[in-house]
Image (cartoon, rainbow, N blue to C red):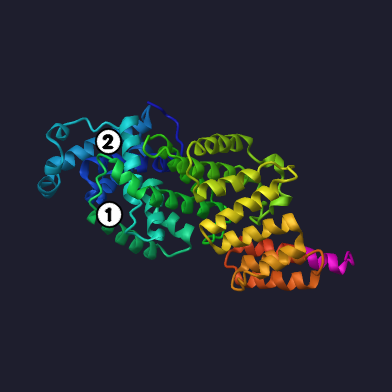
Amino acid sequence: MATNRDQTLIPKLFRLEYSKMTAVLCSHFGLGNIAVAEDIVSETFLKATELWASNVLPENPTAWLYTVARNKAKDYLKRNAIFEAQVKIEIKPEERENDWDFNEESISDSQLAMIFAVCNPGNSTEAQICLALQILCGFSIEEIADAFLSKKETIKKRLFRAKNVLRQDNFQIRTLQEAGISSRLDAVLKTLYLLFNEGYFSKSNDQLIRRELCSEAIRLALILTENTWTNVPKTNALLALMCFQSSRLAARADDSGATILYEQQDKGLWSQELIDKGNYYLVNACSGTEVSKYHLEAGIAYWHTPPTDQHKWDHILKLYNQLILMEYSPVTALNRAFAFAKVYGNEKGIRETEKLQLKDSAEYHALLAYLHTNTAADKAIDLYQKAIDLTKSLPEKKTLRREMENLIKKLNDNEY
Protein backbone atom coordinates (compact mmCIF):
# COMPACT_ATOMS: atom_id res chain seq x y z
CA MET A 1 0.00 0.00 0.00
CA ALA A 2 1.20 3.53 -0.77
CA THR A 3 1.60 5.90 2.14
CA ASN A 4 2.04 9.31 0.48
CA ARG A 5 -0.64 11.96 0.80
CA ASP A 6 -1.26 13.95 -2.35
CA GLN A 7 -4.13 16.40 -1.90
CA THR A 8 -4.43 16.78 -5.67
CA LEU A 9 -4.62 13.05 -6.40
CA ILE A 10 -8.40 12.61 -6.29
CA PRO A 11 -9.14 15.77 -8.36
CA LYS A 12 -6.60 14.57 -10.96
CA LEU A 13 -8.10 11.09 -11.05
CA PHE A 14 -11.60 12.54 -11.27
CA ARG A 15 -10.65 14.57 -14.33
CA LEU A 16 -8.85 11.63 -15.96
CA GLU A 17 -11.14 8.72 -15.08
CA TYR A 18 -14.66 10.09 -14.54
CA SER A 19 -15.55 10.17 -18.22
CA LYS A 20 -14.02 6.75 -18.88
CA MET A 21 -15.92 5.10 -16.03
CA THR A 22 -19.21 6.76 -16.99
CA ALA A 23 -18.82 5.72 -20.62
CA VAL A 24 -18.13 2.06 -19.77
CA LEU A 25 -21.11 1.89 -17.37
CA CYS A 26 -23.39 3.53 -19.93
CA SER A 27 -22.34 0.94 -22.48
CA HIS A 28 -23.93 -1.64 -20.13
CA PHE A 29 -26.82 0.33 -18.66
CA GLY A 30 -27.88 2.12 -21.82
CA LEU A 31 -27.80 5.85 -22.49
CA GLY A 32 -31.28 6.30 -21.00
CA ASN A 33 -29.82 5.52 -17.60
CA ILE A 34 -26.88 7.89 -17.77
CA ALA A 35 -27.87 9.33 -14.38
CA VAL A 36 -27.41 5.89 -12.79
CA ALA A 37 -23.92 5.60 -14.28
CA GLU A 38 -22.98 9.10 -13.10
CA ASP A 39 -24.29 8.37 -9.60
CA ILE A 40 -22.22 5.19 -9.32
CA VAL A 41 -19.07 6.96 -10.47
CA SER A 42 -19.70 9.88 -8.09
CA GLU A 43 -20.28 7.48 -5.20
CA THR A 44 -17.03 5.72 -6.07
CA PHE A 45 -15.05 8.96 -5.82
CA LEU A 46 -16.89 9.91 -2.63
CA LYS A 47 -15.87 6.60 -1.08
CA ALA A 48 -12.27 7.19 -2.21
CA THR A 49 -12.31 10.63 -0.59
CA GLU A 50 -13.56 9.20 2.70
CA LEU A 51 -11.28 6.14 2.86
CA TRP A 52 -8.07 7.58 1.46
CA ALA A 53 -8.15 10.51 3.89
CA SER A 54 -7.93 8.23 6.95
CA ASN A 55 -6.07 5.20 5.55
CA VAL A 56 -3.06 4.52 3.38
CA LEU A 57 -3.54 4.85 -0.35
CA PRO A 58 -3.95 1.74 -2.50
CA GLU A 59 -0.93 0.77 -4.58
CA ASN A 60 -2.91 1.38 -7.77
CA PRO A 61 -5.55 4.07 -7.10
CA THR A 62 -6.99 3.87 -10.63
CA ALA A 63 -7.49 0.11 -10.44
CA TRP A 64 -9.09 0.58 -7.00
CA LEU A 65 -11.59 3.03 -8.47
CA TYR A 66 -12.46 0.66 -11.32
CA THR A 67 -12.94 -2.24 -8.90
CA VAL A 68 -15.23 -0.25 -6.61
CA ALA A 69 -17.26 1.10 -9.54
CA ARG A 70 -17.63 -2.38 -11.00
CA ASN A 71 -18.80 -3.79 -7.65
CA LYS A 72 -21.24 -0.94 -7.12
CA ALA A 73 -22.68 -1.51 -10.60
CA LYS A 74 -23.17 -5.23 -9.89
CA ASP A 75 -24.79 -4.46 -6.53
CA TYR A 76 -27.14 -2.00 -8.17
CA LEU A 77 -28.26 -4.58 -10.69
CA LYS A 78 -28.97 -7.10 -7.98
CA ARG A 79 -30.90 -4.94 -5.53
CA ASN A 80 -32.84 -2.48 -7.67
CA ALA A 81 -36.09 -4.06 -8.85
CA ILE A 82 -37.05 -1.12 -11.07
CA PHE A 83 -33.73 -1.19 -12.80
CA GLU A 84 -34.02 -4.97 -13.22
CA ALA A 85 -37.41 -4.61 -14.90
CA GLN A 86 -36.59 -1.69 -17.17
CA VAL A 87 -32.97 -2.19 -18.10
CA LYS A 88 -31.69 -5.67 -17.42
CA ILE A 89 -33.78 -7.12 -20.22
CA GLU A 90 -31.68 -4.99 -22.59
CA ILE A 91 -28.48 -6.64 -21.40
CA LYS A 92 -27.52 -9.82 -23.21
CA PRO A 93 -27.55 -12.94 -20.98
CA GLU A 94 -23.83 -13.51 -21.47
CA GLU A 95 -23.15 -9.94 -20.27
CA ARG A 96 -25.21 -10.08 -17.07
CA GLU A 97 -22.54 -11.79 -15.00
CA ASN A 98 -19.52 -10.43 -16.78
CA ASP A 99 -16.52 -8.87 -15.06
CA TRP A 100 -17.37 -5.30 -16.12
CA ASP A 101 -13.79 -4.94 -17.26
CA PHE A 102 -12.32 -1.45 -17.43
CA ASN A 103 -9.64 -2.51 -19.88
CA GLU A 104 -8.15 -0.23 -22.53
CA GLU A 105 -10.30 -1.65 -25.32
CA SER A 106 -13.62 -1.31 -23.48
CA ILE A 107 -12.72 2.19 -22.27
CA SER A 108 -11.68 3.34 -25.76
CA ASP A 109 -14.77 1.86 -27.44
CA SER A 110 -17.11 3.24 -24.77
CA GLN A 111 -15.57 6.72 -24.87
CA LEU A 112 -15.85 6.87 -28.65
CA ALA A 113 -19.49 5.82 -28.47
CA MET A 114 -20.16 8.35 -25.71
CA ILE A 115 -18.67 11.17 -27.81
CA PHE A 116 -21.19 10.42 -30.55
CA ALA A 117 -24.04 10.05 -28.06
CA VAL A 118 -23.29 13.41 -26.39
CA CYS A 119 -23.03 15.26 -29.71
CA ASN A 120 -26.75 14.89 -30.38
CA PRO A 121 -27.95 17.31 -33.09
CA GLY A 122 -31.22 17.57 -31.14
CA ASN A 123 -29.41 19.67 -28.53
CA SER A 124 -28.23 23.23 -29.01
CA THR A 125 -24.54 23.89 -29.61
CA GLU A 126 -24.20 25.32 -26.08
CA ALA A 127 -25.86 22.25 -24.58
CA GLN A 128 -23.59 19.91 -26.53
CA ILE A 129 -20.50 21.71 -25.27
CA CYS A 130 -21.80 21.66 -21.66
CA LEU A 131 -22.49 17.94 -21.94
CA ALA A 132 -19.06 17.36 -23.45
CA LEU A 133 -17.41 19.23 -20.59
CA GLN A 134 -19.31 17.31 -17.91
CA ILE A 135 -19.63 13.81 -19.37
CA LEU A 136 -16.57 13.59 -21.60
CA CYS A 137 -14.14 15.81 -19.69
CA GLY A 138 -15.24 15.39 -16.07
CA PHE A 139 -15.84 19.11 -15.43
CA SER A 140 -17.95 20.07 -12.42
CA ILE A 141 -21.01 22.30 -12.79
CA GLU A 142 -19.02 25.08 -11.09
CA GLU A 143 -16.21 24.79 -13.66
CA ILE A 144 -18.67 24.81 -16.55
CA ALA A 145 -20.43 27.86 -15.08
CA ASP A 146 -17.05 29.61 -14.82
CA ALA A 147 -16.18 28.72 -18.41
CA PHE A 148 -19.43 30.21 -19.73
CA LEU A 149 -19.67 33.02 -17.18
CA SER A 150 -23.10 31.69 -16.19
CA LYS A 151 -24.88 30.92 -12.95
CA LYS A 152 -24.71 27.35 -11.68
CA GLU A 153 -28.50 27.07 -11.81
CA THR A 154 -28.47 28.04 -15.49
CA ILE A 155 -25.94 25.32 -16.27
CA LYS A 156 -27.89 22.77 -14.22
CA LYS A 157 -31.07 23.50 -16.19
CA ARG A 158 -29.20 23.36 -19.50
CA LEU A 159 -27.66 20.00 -18.60
CA PHE A 160 -31.00 18.65 -17.33
CA ARG A 161 -32.74 19.48 -20.61
CA ALA A 162 -29.86 18.16 -22.69
CA LYS A 163 -29.76 14.87 -20.80
CA ASN A 164 -33.48 14.43 -21.33
CA VAL A 165 -32.81 14.60 -25.06
CA LEU A 166 -30.13 11.91 -24.65
CA ARG A 167 -32.51 9.65 -22.72
CA GLN A 168 -35.13 9.91 -25.44
CA ASP A 169 -32.58 9.17 -28.13
CA ASN A 170 -32.39 5.67 -29.60
CA PHE A 171 -28.64 6.01 -30.16
CA GLN A 172 -26.96 2.74 -29.15
CA ILE A 173 -23.82 3.31 -27.15
CA ARG A 174 -22.98 -0.37 -26.71
CA THR A 175 -22.17 -1.05 -30.36
CA LEU A 176 -21.33 1.76 -32.73
CA GLN A 177 -22.48 1.26 -36.31
CA GLU A 178 -20.97 2.96 -39.35
CA ALA A 179 -24.30 4.58 -40.22
CA GLY A 180 -24.58 6.17 -36.77
CA ILE A 181 -21.05 7.48 -37.03
CA SER A 182 -21.45 8.95 -40.51
CA SER A 183 -24.70 10.71 -39.57
CA ARG A 184 -23.13 12.45 -36.55
CA LEU A 185 -19.47 12.92 -37.38
CA ASP A 186 -19.97 16.51 -38.53
CA ALA A 187 -21.78 17.35 -35.27
CA VAL A 188 -18.99 15.71 -33.26
CA LEU A 189 -16.24 17.60 -35.09
CA LYS A 190 -18.12 20.89 -34.73
CA THR A 191 -18.54 20.36 -30.98
CA LEU A 192 -14.84 19.61 -30.52
CA TYR A 193 -13.96 22.60 -32.72
CA LEU A 194 -16.10 24.93 -30.59
CA LEU A 195 -14.80 23.38 -27.38
CA PHE A 196 -11.23 24.08 -28.51
CA ASN A 197 -12.08 27.63 -29.57
CA GLU A 198 -13.64 28.36 -26.18
CA GLY A 199 -10.31 27.42 -24.67
CA TYR A 200 -8.14 29.14 -27.28
CA PHE A 201 -9.96 32.46 -27.20
CA SER A 202 -12.52 32.53 -24.43
CA LYS A 203 -15.29 35.06 -24.93
CA SER A 204 -17.19 34.04 -21.82
CA ASN A 205 -14.56 34.11 -19.11
CA ASP A 206 -12.15 36.53 -17.49
CA GLN A 207 -9.34 34.32 -18.78
CA LEU A 208 -8.38 34.69 -22.42
CA ILE A 209 -6.94 31.17 -22.61
CA ARG A 210 -8.37 28.04 -20.99
CA ARG A 211 -5.64 25.49 -21.66
CA GLU A 212 -7.59 22.67 -20.05
CA LEU A 213 -10.35 23.09 -22.65
CA CYS A 214 -7.83 22.99 -25.49
CA SER A 215 -6.21 19.88 -24.01
CA GLU A 216 -9.55 18.10 -23.61
CA ALA A 217 -10.57 18.92 -27.19
CA ILE A 218 -7.29 17.48 -28.47
CA ARG A 219 -7.67 14.37 -26.28
CA LEU A 220 -11.15 13.68 -27.65
CA ALA A 221 -10.03 14.30 -31.23
CA LEU A 222 -7.21 11.81 -30.73
CA ILE A 223 -9.79 9.19 -29.73
CA LEU A 224 -11.45 9.72 -33.10
CA THR A 225 -8.18 9.00 -34.93
CA GLU A 226 -7.96 5.60 -33.23
CA ASN A 227 -11.08 4.25 -34.95
CA THR A 228 -11.14 3.29 -38.64
CA TRP A 229 -14.54 4.88 -39.27
CA THR A 230 -13.63 8.21 -37.63
CA ASN A 231 -9.98 8.44 -38.67
CA VAL A 232 -10.91 10.36 -41.82
CA PRO A 233 -9.25 13.38 -43.50
CA LYS A 234 -11.42 16.05 -41.85
CA THR A 235 -10.79 14.56 -38.40
CA ASN A 236 -7.04 14.75 -39.01
CA ALA A 237 -7.41 18.28 -40.38
CA LEU A 238 -9.19 19.39 -37.20
CA LEU A 239 -6.51 17.76 -35.05
CA ALA A 240 -3.79 19.44 -37.10
CA LEU A 241 -5.50 22.80 -36.57
CA MET A 242 -5.66 22.23 -32.81
CA CYS A 243 -1.97 21.27 -32.66
CA PHE A 244 -0.82 24.29 -34.67
CA GLN A 245 -2.91 26.68 -32.58
CA SER A 246 -1.86 25.08 -29.29
CA SER A 247 1.81 25.40 -30.25
CA ARG A 248 1.57 29.16 -29.60
CA LEU A 249 -0.47 29.12 -26.38
CA ALA A 250 2.50 29.83 -24.11
CA ALA A 251 3.32 32.97 -26.12
CA ARG A 252 -0.21 34.38 -26.48
CA ALA A 253 -0.66 36.08 -23.10
CA ASP A 254 1.53 37.95 -20.64
CA ASP A 255 1.65 37.45 -16.87
CA SER A 256 -1.31 39.79 -16.38
CA GLY A 257 -3.48 37.81 -18.83
CA ALA A 258 -3.41 40.41 -21.62
CA THR A 259 -3.07 39.22 -25.20
CA ILE A 260 0.32 39.30 -26.88
CA LEU A 261 -0.26 40.02 -30.56
CA TYR A 262 1.12 37.54 -33.07
CA GLU A 263 3.93 39.80 -34.28
CA GLN A 264 5.05 40.54 -30.71
CA GLN A 265 5.12 36.94 -29.49
CA ASP A 266 8.34 35.31 -28.31
CA LYS A 267 8.84 32.68 -31.01
CA GLY A 268 11.11 30.78 -28.65
CA LEU A 269 8.03 29.91 -26.58
CA TRP A 270 6.32 28.18 -29.50
CA SER A 271 6.17 24.41 -29.11
CA GLN A 272 8.06 22.71 -31.93
CA GLU A 273 6.70 19.36 -30.74
CA LEU A 274 3.12 20.48 -31.34
CA ILE A 275 4.06 22.04 -34.68
CA ASP A 276 5.57 18.70 -35.74
CA LYS A 277 2.41 16.88 -34.63
CA GLY A 278 0.33 19.38 -36.57
CA ASN A 279 2.42 18.67 -39.67
CA TYR A 280 1.88 14.93 -39.16
CA TYR A 281 -1.90 15.19 -38.93
CA LEU A 282 -2.05 17.70 -41.79
CA VAL A 283 -0.27 15.22 -44.05
CA ASN A 284 -2.78 12.55 -42.96
CA ALA A 285 -5.61 14.97 -43.73
CA CYS A 286 -4.45 15.27 -47.34
CA SER A 287 -4.86 11.57 -48.09
CA GLY A 288 -8.11 12.04 -50.04
CA THR A 289 -9.83 14.57 -52.27
CA GLU A 290 -12.03 16.13 -49.57
CA VAL A 291 -11.36 19.74 -48.59
CA SER A 292 -13.25 20.81 -45.47
CA LYS A 293 -13.21 24.06 -43.51
CA TYR A 294 -10.86 22.31 -41.10
CA HIS A 295 -8.39 21.69 -43.93
CA LEU A 296 -8.39 25.38 -44.83
CA GLU A 297 -8.10 26.57 -41.23
CA ALA A 298 -5.34 24.04 -40.54
CA GLY A 299 -3.52 25.36 -43.60
CA ILE A 300 -3.86 28.93 -42.33
CA ALA A 301 -2.60 27.87 -38.90
CA TYR A 302 0.32 26.04 -40.53
CA TRP A 303 1.44 29.17 -42.39
CA HIS A 304 1.48 31.04 -39.08
CA THR A 305 4.17 28.68 -37.74
CA PRO A 306 7.13 29.58 -40.05
CA PRO A 307 8.31 32.84 -38.40
CA THR A 308 10.40 34.14 -41.31
CA ASP A 309 8.70 33.01 -44.55
CA GLN A 310 8.37 36.13 -46.71
CA HIS A 311 5.42 34.83 -48.72
CA LYS A 312 3.35 33.26 -45.96
CA TRP A 313 0.71 36.01 -46.00
CA ASP A 314 0.08 35.38 -49.70
CA HIS A 315 -0.64 31.75 -48.87
CA ILE A 316 -2.79 32.72 -45.87
CA LEU A 317 -4.86 35.18 -47.92
CA LYS A 318 -5.50 32.58 -50.64
CA LEU A 319 -6.74 30.13 -48.01
CA TYR A 320 -8.99 32.77 -46.43
CA ASN A 321 -10.42 33.53 -49.89
CA GLN A 322 -11.45 29.87 -50.14
CA LEU A 323 -12.68 29.65 -46.57
CA ILE A 324 -14.94 32.68 -46.77
CA LEU A 325 -16.61 31.21 -49.85
CA MET A 326 -17.10 27.88 -48.11
CA GLU A 327 -18.43 29.26 -44.82
CA TYR A 328 -18.80 32.98 -44.18
CA SER A 329 -18.47 34.37 -40.68
CA PRO A 330 -17.59 37.86 -39.38
CA VAL A 331 -14.47 36.47 -37.69
CA THR A 332 -13.29 34.90 -40.95
CA ALA A 333 -14.00 38.13 -42.84
CA LEU A 334 -11.98 40.21 -40.37
CA ASN A 335 -9.09 37.74 -40.37
CA ARG A 336 -9.11 37.81 -44.16
CA ALA A 337 -9.01 41.63 -44.10
CA PHE A 338 -5.96 41.48 -41.81
CA ALA A 339 -4.22 39.09 -44.20
CA PHE A 340 -5.24 41.34 -47.12
CA ALA A 341 -3.53 44.28 -45.39
CA LYS A 342 -0.39 42.19 -44.87
CA VAL A 343 -0.23 41.47 -48.59
CA TYR A 344 -1.39 44.80 -50.09
CA GLY A 345 -0.62 47.32 -47.35
CA ASN A 346 -2.59 49.02 -44.58
CA GLU A 347 -4.30 51.61 -46.77
CA LYS A 348 -5.94 48.97 -48.96
CA GLY A 349 -6.51 46.86 -45.86
CA ILE A 350 -8.53 49.71 -44.31
CA ARG A 351 -10.76 49.97 -47.37
CA GLU A 352 -11.23 46.19 -47.40
CA THR A 353 -12.13 46.19 -43.69
CA GLU A 354 -14.57 49.13 -43.96
CA LYS A 355 -16.52 47.22 -46.64
CA LEU A 356 -17.55 44.76 -43.94
CA GLN A 357 -19.45 47.38 -41.93
CA LEU A 358 -19.27 45.28 -38.72
CA LYS A 359 -19.77 48.32 -36.51
CA ASP A 360 -21.13 46.32 -33.58
CA SER A 361 -17.99 44.21 -33.44
CA ALA A 362 -15.12 45.08 -31.10
CA GLU A 363 -12.73 43.19 -33.39
CA TYR A 364 -13.79 45.35 -36.35
CA HIS A 365 -12.83 48.60 -34.59
CA ALA A 366 -9.67 47.02 -33.13
CA LEU A 367 -8.49 45.97 -36.59
CA LEU A 368 -9.16 49.42 -38.05
CA ALA A 369 -7.32 50.97 -35.10
CA TYR A 370 -4.32 48.73 -35.75
CA LEU A 371 -4.31 49.62 -39.46
CA HIS A 372 -4.57 53.37 -38.75
CA THR A 373 -1.83 53.37 -36.09
CA ASN A 374 1.07 54.55 -38.26
CA THR A 375 -0.84 57.15 -40.29
CA ALA A 376 -3.70 58.50 -38.17
CA ALA A 377 -2.94 58.03 -34.49
CA ASP A 378 -5.84 60.19 -33.23
CA LYS A 379 -8.33 58.15 -35.25
CA ALA A 380 -6.72 54.92 -34.08
CA ILE A 381 -7.14 56.00 -30.44
CA ASP A 382 -10.85 56.69 -31.00
CA LEU A 383 -11.25 53.31 -32.66
CA TYR A 384 -9.50 51.53 -29.81
CA GLN A 385 -11.90 53.21 -27.36
CA LYS A 386 -14.89 51.99 -29.39
CA ALA A 387 -13.48 48.47 -29.31
CA ILE A 388 -12.96 48.69 -25.53
CA ASP A 389 -16.55 49.81 -25.04
CA LEU A 390 -17.91 46.96 -27.16
CA THR A 391 -16.00 43.98 -25.85
CA LYS A 392 -17.14 42.05 -22.77
CA SER A 393 -13.88 40.17 -22.40
CA LEU A 394 -11.72 41.52 -19.58
CA PRO A 395 -8.42 40.28 -21.08
CA GLU A 396 -9.39 41.81 -24.42
CA LYS A 397 -10.18 45.14 -22.74
CA LYS A 398 -6.78 45.01 -21.07
CA THR A 399 -5.02 44.37 -24.36
CA LEU A 400 -6.88 47.10 -26.24
CA ARG A 401 -6.30 49.59 -23.44
CA ARG A 402 -2.58 48.78 -23.45
CA GLU A 403 -2.35 49.41 -27.22
CA MET A 404 -4.31 52.66 -26.88
CA GLU A 405 -2.15 53.90 -24.00
CA ASN A 406 1.04 53.10 -25.92
CA LEU A 407 -0.28 55.15 -28.81
CA ILE A 408 -1.19 58.07 -26.55
CA LYS A 409 2.28 57.98 -25.00
CA LYS A 410 3.92 58.13 -28.44
CA LEU A 411 1.75 61.12 -29.34
CA ASN A 412 2.66 62.89 -26.12
CA ASP A 413 6.34 62.13 -26.74
CA ASN A 414 6.02 63.62 -30.24
CA GLU A 415 7.08 60.37 -31.89
CA TYR A 416 4.63 61.02 -34.76
- Give the total of numbered labels: 2
Check disc 1 and report the residue beneath it: 166
- The answer for how far apart the CA atoms under marks 2 and 1 are is 26 Å
- Choose the circle earlier in sequence order: 2 or 1: 2
Name the one closer to the observer, 264 or 401. 264
User: The N terminus appears in which quarter of the rendering?
Assistant: top left
Residue 131 visible, this angle? yes
Using the rendered image of the protein, determine whether residue 44 is visible from the camera's viewpoint.
Answer: no
Q: Position of residue 325 (x, y in %)?
A: 54, 58
Figure check: 25 above or below 190? above
Number of other residues with Cα within 10 Å of mark 2, as a class: few under 14, some 14 to 19, many 20 or more: some
Residue under the image location 25 percent in, 36 percent down: 70
Nearer to us of marks 2 and 1 is: 1
Query: Which of the pair 188/107 is nearer the observer?
Result: 188
Q: Foreground: 398 or 93?
A: 93
Quadrant in which residue 20 is drawn: top left
Q: Position of residue 355 (x, y in %)?
A: 65, 70
* Disc 2 residue type (three-letter): Val
Residue found farthest to the front: 289
Q: Is residue 61 magenta?
A: no
Report which quarter residue 202 is drawn in.
bottom right
Look at the numbered disc 1 and give the secondary structure of its residue: helix
Where is 26 relative to 284, above or below?
below
Q: Amino acid at mark 1?
A: Leu
Disc 2 secondary structure class: helix
Q: Which residues are magenta?
A: 406-416
Q: Nearer the viewer, residue 115 or 393?
A: 115
Q: Are marks 2 and 1 in contact (CB under 8 Å)?
A: no
In the rendered structure, does residue 407 fall within the stretch colored magenta?
yes
| Image location (x, y in percent) of residue 116 | 34, 47
What residue is disc 2 on?
Answer: 68
